[in-house]
Amino acid sequence: MSADHGKRLYQVVHTTAYDYDAPVTNSYGRGCLRPRPQSSQTLLEHTITIDPQPQVMDETRDLFGNYTHYLEIHTDHERLEVVKESVLQVEWPEVDLVELDQQTVGVAAARLRHDGSLDPVEHALYTLPSAHVQLSDEVRRFAEAAVPADRPLGEAIASLHHQIYSDFAYTKGATTVNSTLPELLESRAGVCQDFAHLAVACFRAAGLPARYVSGYIETTPPPGTTKLAGSDATHAWVSVFTPAGWVDLDPTNDHLADSRYIVTAWGRDFRDVSPLRGVIFTEATRSSLTVGVEVTRLDTER
């Protein structure tokens, strides 16, 4: 077994703070504030701290099975801080891409449409276009070259995350949350959200269900340096459904997901799994957002 597929114990602290130049009188928000249960991880501890304290806070499960929280704050404030702390046990299985090579992309897509291995509604949700994953002509041309129907499935999965990693530059500020895939294909620069959306689009164009996954990844500082508090960040990758089940891959880092990956939520695209969004009532003209993430490995086994 690869060293990155063994069992690991993590603490994740995610702090989101909004500062305003005038009081906010009412704030209404929704976000994914609790990591979701899944086969690769077990949530052992979890707390949510919000300042000022909400007058209304409700936790439910959404269409995709994610935990979603609704908040109402009616106390005047110039700063809103949300801190979520989690302790999780994580262990991802290794994926046998050679076994997936026993069928091509086209054969697998046809089989998955008819074999009932995925609920028909779920199959449609993750195969049809969505708000941030529009299958334009430019996107389809890229997808047809990247994930051709006659390519062995395992080879296609590995080739796609490597191609995006190789052909696109990771550049903060090159895109916004509203950037489109055609714009990404033209600029060849973006961040993990963009690369995940592009990979999702390629699989969907090939007829394979694919979902956008939001969470965290353990990072390691350069040799001889100390990891800075809050230096981690949220991360995004893609999960594609195959005859062997869901396979998670990370085009930003050019490999499959392993036990360094912690899942918060998944959906059709970023819009379904936004960490926190909402509406405020205020006369403020300026605001600032500060996000800090710390992913700490708690077990000592390395």
Image: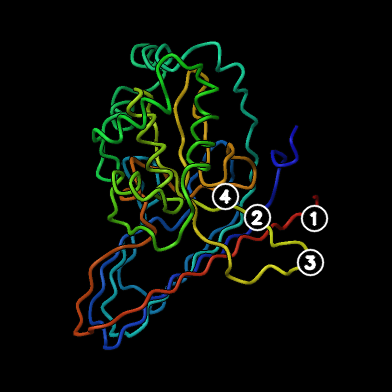
Question: Which mark is in front, 2 or 4?
Answer: 2
Which secondary structure, mark 4? strand
Taking depth in this image into account, of 11 and 108 the one nearest to the observer is 108
- Look at mark 3 in the image and give the residue it sits on: 224
At label 1, the amino acid type is Thr
Q: CA distance from mark 2 to mark 1?
A: 11 Å
Give the quadrant of the N terminus.
top right
Among the two numbered marks 2 and 4 on one chain, the one whose residue lies closer to the N terminus:
2
In three-dimensional space, the C-alpha distance between marks 2 and 3, rounded to whole angstroms, equals 22 Å
Q: Which residue is mark 4?
A: 43
Residue 218: give its label: none
Q: Nearer the viewer, residue 277 or 158?
A: 158
Within the image, what quadrant is residue 267 found in? Answer: top left
Q: CA distance from mark 1 to mark 3?
A: 19 Å
Q: How is the image coloured?
A: rainbow
Give yes or no for contact between labels 1 and 4 (Cβ–Cβ under 8 Å).
no
Q: Is residue 96 above or below residue 237?
A: above
Q: Viewed as shown, does residue 212 lie left or right of 159?
A: left
Residue 131 position in % (x across, y down): 24, 44
User: Depth-wise, is mark 3 or mark 4 nearer the camera?
Assistant: 3
Q: In the current view of this chain or complex, which residue is farthest to the bottom?
A: 22
Residue at (73%, 69%) from the top-left corner?
226
Which residue carries the number 1 mark? 300
The answer to whether residue 154 is left or right of residue 173 is right
Which residue is label 2 attached to?
Answer: 10
Residue at image point 47% right, 14% down: 104
Residue occupying the point 36% across, 30% down: 143
